[in-house]
Image: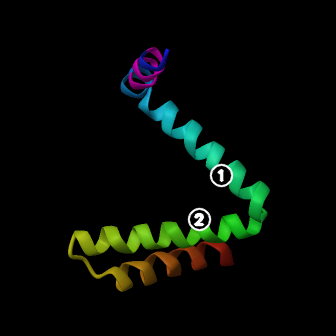
Amino acid sequence: MNEDLQKMLLDMWQKHRGKSCGLIMGMLFGTAVLCFGFWHTFFVLCCGLIGLFIGTQLDHEEDALGSLREKAWMLFERFQR
């Protein structure tokens, strides 16, 4: 039984990786919303995305703060209209 479950999960991961990741992320998000509330979860996700953006910029040896400032300014200008 255990080997069958492992084989099924491995097969699902290899053939449907995007769906599997989406399912896991959705379940984690739903659990976090139930435990902490929507806005707390949203804040943590936003902080994580900002950290991911800065980390990616640093990996590519780009000016992380300059890029973040530029993107934030573009977003600010878009919402002023």
Label 2 sits on residue: 45
Q: Position of residue 39 (x, y in %)?
A: 75, 68
Question: Does 8 appear in magenta?
Answer: yes
Q: Position of residue 66 (x, y in %)?
A: 36, 85
Task: State the residue at coordinates (45%, 14%).
Answer: 4
* Residue 58 lies in quadrant: bottom left
Question: Does 73 appear in magenta?
Answer: no
- The three-letter amino acid code for the residue at tag 1 is Phe
Mark 2, other Cα within 10 Å: few <14 / some 14–19 / many ≥20: few
Task: State the residue at coordinates (50%, 66%).
Answer: 49
Q: Which residue occupies the foreground of this view, 27 or 2? A: 2
Task: State the residue at coordinates (63%, 44%).
Answer: 26
Distance between the alpha carbons at the discs numbered 2 and 1: 9 Å
Q: Do labels 2 and 1 touch, CB within 8 Å?
A: yes
Residue at the extreme front: 1
- The three-letter amino acid code for the residue at tag 2 is Leu
* Residue 69 lies in quadrant: bottom left
Above or below residue 68? Residue 18 is above
Task: State the residue at coordinates (69%, 57%).
Answer: 32
Q: Position of residue 65 (x, y in %)?
A: 37, 85
Q: Which residue occupies the foreground of this view, 44 or 59? A: 44
Magenta residues, start to end: 4-10
Q: Is residue 21 left or right of residue 11?
A: right
Q: Secondary structure at mark 1?
A: helix
Label 1 sits on residue: 29
Q: Secondary structure at mark 2?
A: helix
